[in-house]
Amino acid sequence: MQKVTIIFLTLLSVLCSTPALAKDLSPAVIDRWIATLTAFENQEADWPNSGALDMNDGELGGDILAMQQQLQARLAEEVERYPEAMAILRQNGFSSGEAWAATYLQIGRAFGALQMEEQGGIGELDQEMRQALAQLDSNPHLSEAQKAQIRQQMGAATQTLETFTHGVSAADKAAVRARLKPLQTLFDTE
């Protein structure tokens, strides 16, 4: 279960604007995807390797879309390296590692959008950011350069979250909502 959590947190940290995905999610697709991860967890072998999916900002120059595309490609490559993993994907209706990885990202975005909505959405986040900026401005222990850097980082984080939640279809959120309990268990977010 720890591998799944690590992979999901990695995905969640880089997911942002996604090119339009071909199909909306359905509860049945999510069930098939969950079945693949459950089967992976039940295997004795140490695959897929979540460490292969680690990325850092310097590696991609901070381009969020490029990071997402590279993450999807790495995830697909990782499962495609193992015939046993590909057999599990095919048994659950995924034609390729790429199709499985795209579904993974789509579920992750919808799950993240629902989590954001639960926590008050962007409006609540915006209010909290304004409060944090006011506290930052009144902090005498930070230089103006440090304050400027923190402001820039906070702005980038807000923009990332706005982009992350924007464009997730209502159908994807509804499908994830229908399978929220098993996904929360899988992602250890309960």
Image (spheres, rainbow, N blue to C red):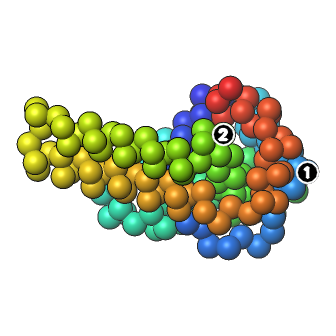
Q: Is residue 100 shown left or right of residue 25?
A: left
Disc on res. 174: none
Q: Marks 2 and 1: in contact by CB < 8 Å?
A: no
Mark 2 is on which residue type? Glu
**Residue 108 in the image, given as x and y percentages of width and height:** 65, 49
**Residue 71 in the image, given as x and y percentages of width and height:** 53, 57
Compared with 125, 182 (above or below) is above
Name which of mark 1 and mark 2 comes first in the sequence: 1
SS class of the residue under badge 1?
Answer: helix
- Frontmost residue, 22 versus 154: 154
Residue sitting at 55 percent across and 66 percent down?
Answer: 17
Callout 1: 10 Å neighbours few (<14), some, many (20+)?
A: few
Disc on res. 28: 1
Q: Quadrant of residue 190?
A: top right
Callout 2: 10 Å neighbours few (<14), some, many (20+)?
A: few
Disc on res. 118: 2
- Frontmost residue, 65 versus 118: 118
Q: Is residue 46 visible?
A: no
Name the mark nearer the viewer: 1 or 2.
2
SS class of the residue under badge 2?
Answer: helix
- Frontmost residue, 88 versus 8: 8
Using the numbered discs, state the Cα–Cα distance from disc 1 to disc 2 in whole angstroms.
Answer: 24 Å
Dividing the image into 4 quarters, which one contains the N terminus? top right
Q: Is residue 189 visible?
A: yes
Residue sitting at 79 percent across and 47 percent down?
Answer: 176
**Residue 159 in the image, given as x and y percentages of width and height:** 44, 59
Q: Is residue 98 shown left or right of residue 126?
A: right
- Frontmost residue, 35 versus 127: 127
**Residue 184 in the image, given as x and y percentages of width and height:** 72, 33
Mark 1 is on which residue type? Ala
Compared with 88, 103 (above or below) is below
